Image (cartoon, rainbow, N blue to C red):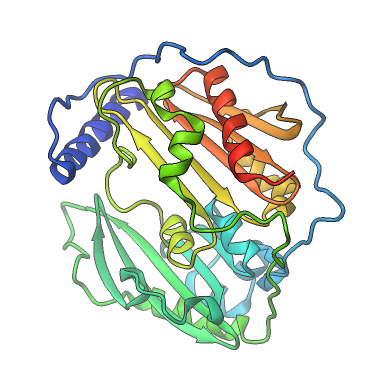
Amino acid sequence: MDRAAAYRHRLAAACVALLLGLSVSGCAPAASPEAESTVPPVTPTTSASPTADPAVTIPVAPFGGDCDVLFQEDGVLAAIGPAEQRTPTERWWVGLQTAGGLSCGFSADAVGGSVVVLPSALTGSLSIDESEPGCRRAYDEVWCSDTRTGGDFWVLALGVYGDNPSAPSMEGAPVPEVLTELADAVAVAVSDETATPVTPSATTVALPLDCADLADEIDVPSLLGDGKIFPTRIEEGGGPLDRILAEAVAVSGRCDWAELEDFREVGLVVYPDAAWAWSEPELSESLEAPEALAVSGFDAQVSGNEYRTVVLVSDGTNLVEVIGHGIETDDLIAATERVLAAVSTP
């Protein structure tokens, strides 16, 4: 199945799930046509390569914020062998690291998945499925997880298992020994580590976001049309692990809107106090062929493919991300200007 066909298949499945949850009709699998522009176009202004403001506070994360250091720990190597760090394709890790945590996706011969280390002060009231040991279905995968505490940190070791017709399903199975050993090893390795989150300032965006007010401020109907608009994404399952965690511990804010006639979507994510990450290589690497520009006078990057367009901006204190599907790039940049006017303090 090619990428476009696979995307349409997943979009159809997500649309069915959304329809069942919202009791609407008229959804059918189809490629999303480009939306007609209803916002005056904005001409991007070329900007210098992204650089962090020297006055921006940088968080102190375990292992120096370097997943490769974690995977070179003796106990971790003994548990899973050599591991290759996976480059994230979304930016939820930024919020987690801003709060003094670290998220590391990996692939190893023994297992593939994620290790997440968060300050225990953030996770005292954490209530997500993955915080309990076990193997559970996550849409078309099974996630097996185990947790530990080490020093001042909470540790999650998660393995991702696909459906294999020739093997018993992992759903409901005991946590594999490789994950319990990994969780033990990370807990030991992190026990002597320290973390310092970024201290909020007068220009820190406050959470939670008021999505209803923001919908008015950025004029969502001008982007999605006059049809029925739903305050949600079109997607299957509960989303990626880092997003689940970032929202559970309130280190990022998110608003989404979608319409189901032409499958257009627009959303925004705010990462408070995360301007430190602007010059991190992983940030640009998470975007597909990003181009530098200026939006409302701020450094920005825009990235797009046939499925979605992302505009990522640093306002000097926070990171602001605006995502669109089926929306012209110039219209999305104009919407980003309105988002910045609503959430960023000069």
Q: Position of residue 157 (x, y in %)?
A: 44, 71
Residue 34 seen in render: yes
- In the rendered view, would you say 166 is above or below 231? below
Residue for point 63% across, 75% down: 73
- In the rendered view, would you say 251 is above or below 282? below
Image mark count: 0
Question: Based on the displayed image, in which of its 4 quarters is residue 334 positioned?
Answer: top right
- In the rendered view, would you say 176 is above or below 239? below
Residue for point 27% across, 27% down: 8
Residue for point 35% across, 20% down: 225
Near-viewer residue (150 or 338): 338
On-image quarter of the C terminus: top right
- The residue furthest right is 54
Residue for point 48% across, 70% down: 80
Q: Position of residue 109 (x, y in %)?
A: 45, 60
Q: Position of residue 302 (x, y in %)?
A: 62, 28
- In the rendered view, would you say 17 is above or below 135? above
Residue 89 seen in render: no
Question: Based on the displayed image, in which of its 4 quarters is residue 83 positioned?
Answer: bottom right
Near-viewer residue (23 or 216): 216
133 sits to left or right of 86: left
143 sits to left or right of 278: left
Near-viewer residue (276 or 267): 267
Q: Position of residue 36 (x, y in %)?
A: 41, 11
On-image quarter of the N terminus: top left
